Amino acid sequence: MATFLYKLGRLAFRRRHFVALIWVALLTLAGVGAASAPAAGSSSFSIPGTEAQKAFDLLEQRFPGASADGATGRLVFKAPEGEKMTDAANKAAVAKTVTALGDGSEVVSVTDPYKTHAVSKDGTVAYISVKYDAPSMELKDSTRDALEAAGDQARDSGLTVEVGGDALQAGAEAGAAGEIVGLVIAAFVLVITLGSVVAAGLPLLTAVIGVGIGVSTITALAKALDLGDTTSTLALMIGLAVGIDYALFIVSRYRGELAEGRDREEAAGRATGTAGSAVVFAGLTVVIALAGLSVVGVPMLSKMGLAAAGTVVIAVLIALTMIPALLGYAGRKIRPAGEKRKKSVEKTPGKPNLGTRWASFVIRRPAVVLLLGVVGLGAIALPATSLELGLPDDGSQPTSTTQRRAYDLLSEGFGPGFNGPLMVVGDAQDSADPKAAATEVADRIKGLDDVVTVTPAAFNKAGDTFTITVIPDSKPSSTQTEDLVHAIRDAGTDVKAGTDTDVLVTGTTAMNIDFSQKLTDALIPYLALVVGLAFLLLIVVFRSILVPLKAALGFLLSVLAALGAVVAVFQWGWLGGLIGVEETGPIMSMMPIFMVGVVFGLAMDYEVFLVTRMREAYVHGESPSQAVVTGFKHSARVVVAAAVIMMAVFGGFISSSESMIKMIGFGLAIAVFFDAFVVRMAIVPAVLALLGRKAWWLPKWLDRALPNVDVEGEGLAAHDAPKDGDPDEDRELVRV
């Protein structure tokens, strides 16, 4: 591996014009494809195999033309103080709004609140429901504008009007200002770490190019592959972070090779062969973790994982080829590591750096450091025992949005459960008396706890399928509503036995409950697959059993601590005001499995970069303790910089108004902090110090069976080049 990458690095250095041209051409091609691609359609949300999805599919089949997947909008009205919505002037304003909305080209139906009893008991709140024939992501801008314009027109009459429903998207913007701040912080850290504006610019440039290719490709394929906005957001988030980090490791190693006296081409080859090998295996662990999301069985999650994995692959390829090419362009502007401090080093020869001093401290007190690290992360992880899962709705939006205010008005006028109605679907095709079956279902539901309203059954034209709407007494994300869903399903089992009618529960709330359960059931198999594959990969890299085991256990500790922090902030509200959490509630259903996938991949990045340098020192004859110190001497500064950069990039997404993006950004940023600064910087050296030579033990039979990937670069000894030369541009110009 090291020898191949060494040759690749030297080739890219020499043929820099060709390599740069290829990547610029790919970026241009992807950009043109994105610009000319048709607008992305609906990013359908389906959960195959769940009861809620079966009910939804049954509705599509038995109620043709009903646009079961069509967008919905709600205009919620509140009368001025001292007035009611039943007053003549207010009724006239609502009637005018109903007429205006009915003229829309994509509108299927508009309800009149005075005919559908959509006026609150105290008469102060009313709402109009609008049904569209296209999914929310496919609605024309003119249709959304018409919905907002209708609300503005009604406001002119003195009414309070707010707009809810999925027709008016809250917007999945990812905090553009925050992303810029994250990149600025990353640039600052790179300049401090590398001591050169040119050297710092290379990782930023290659990361932006990689993300540009990845996100543009996703945009170009969004319509064909049914990809949503969140897919490109995740790819952007992960691609920026790993793209900067991978390039940073190679540039840093290049400067180290220059400091040892090697010429620039040789230094580029060796940096690619050694640090590049670590980049390849670190990238593989991230790809395994992200692509492994496909085993969950949720198409949306699978697409997000595969798209982000593709962006990581691009980041790895760019780091291995474009970075050596750009190093060739940079010439002597990238100084050898430590050149600026040369005079001070001469005055105080052998002065250890901060990484060396820290590693020496940990080795002297490994048990204490290990205990403090484990107990500290364990305490932070405790809130995770109270984890409640759900999916964000308009109730989790900031109070500044009209969607949130519409949600609150409906809760005020009709009760909290009105925002999460349950739809009960009865398949009475095999029943002798479908109407009697529907009556029995309705009667059973009325007798359950937490039920406010049960509408009469509505049959399809064939008379073999019916729907019943149930309004719970509790808000959609509450445990009481979840208990009600299970109670209706249990009652449906009894109805099935007596009437041959299948009773299914669907609706947004039921879909959320089923989604959460599906993800919970998939978590253990996913962990086993991802951790198992990565464990085998790390055995090949480190040629050890205990080091990969320690890496996996350390990851579990950091991800549990991160989940605990997420619960404390987003579910309990601790310090939530600092990052703009306006509404606490259940944690997004996909958060645990998503964090496991992404954080595992990133955690293994630090493990590979840090421990391969220790392994390299140990292989070259140093004692286990000294190898730990050497690894920190060369890698700690860069790993810390990489972690700070990742935290800055992820932290930039915390400024998003979209609660899901905000939660993902915070969760990943805090997880990187725990893993890099507590697990990798403290627990890892402590464990290695306690294990000594046992850390690198591998059964002889397994050692013979494993392929030798040579991450440490032992095979590069045959390629030693003179250290006192420096290839001129003249020699290169003849070759190009």
Image (cartoon, rainbow, N blue to C red):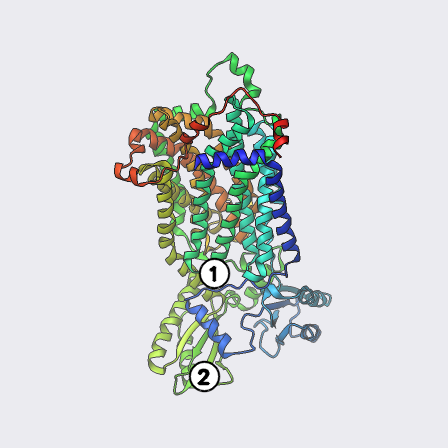
Residue drawn at (44%, 56%) of the image: 294
Question: In whole angstroms, how far apart are the C-alphas of marks 1 and 2?
Answer: 31 Å
Decide: is 392 above or below 579.
Answer: below
Q: Nearer the viewer, residue 95 or 729?
A: 729
Q: Which mark is drawn over residue 299?
A: 1
Quick one: 594 or 719, which is closer to the camera?
Answer: 719
* Image x and y of residue 299, in percent: 47, 60
Dot placed on the residue nearer the N-terminal end, 1 or 2: 1
Which quadrant holds residue 323?
A: top right
Q: Circle 2 — which element?
A: loop
Image quadrant for the C terminus?
A: top right
Q: Position of residue 375 (x, y in %)?
A: 36, 37
Decide if residue 353 is in sight here. yes
Q: Residue furthest bottom?
A: 432
Name the image quarter holding residue 652: top right
Can you tell which mark lies on residue 190? none
Residue at (51, 33) in percent of width and height = 250
Q: Residue at x 53, y 24 (%)?
A: 258
In this view, the mark in front (1 or 2) = 1
What amino acid is found at the position of numbered circle 1 in the picture? Pro
Is 50 situated left or right of 414 in this image?
Answer: left
Residue farthest to the top? Answer: 347
Which of the pair 308/73 is nearer the observer?
A: 308
Q: Circle 1 sits in a helix, a strand or a loop, which is it? A: helix
Would you name the residue on which mark 2 appears?
464
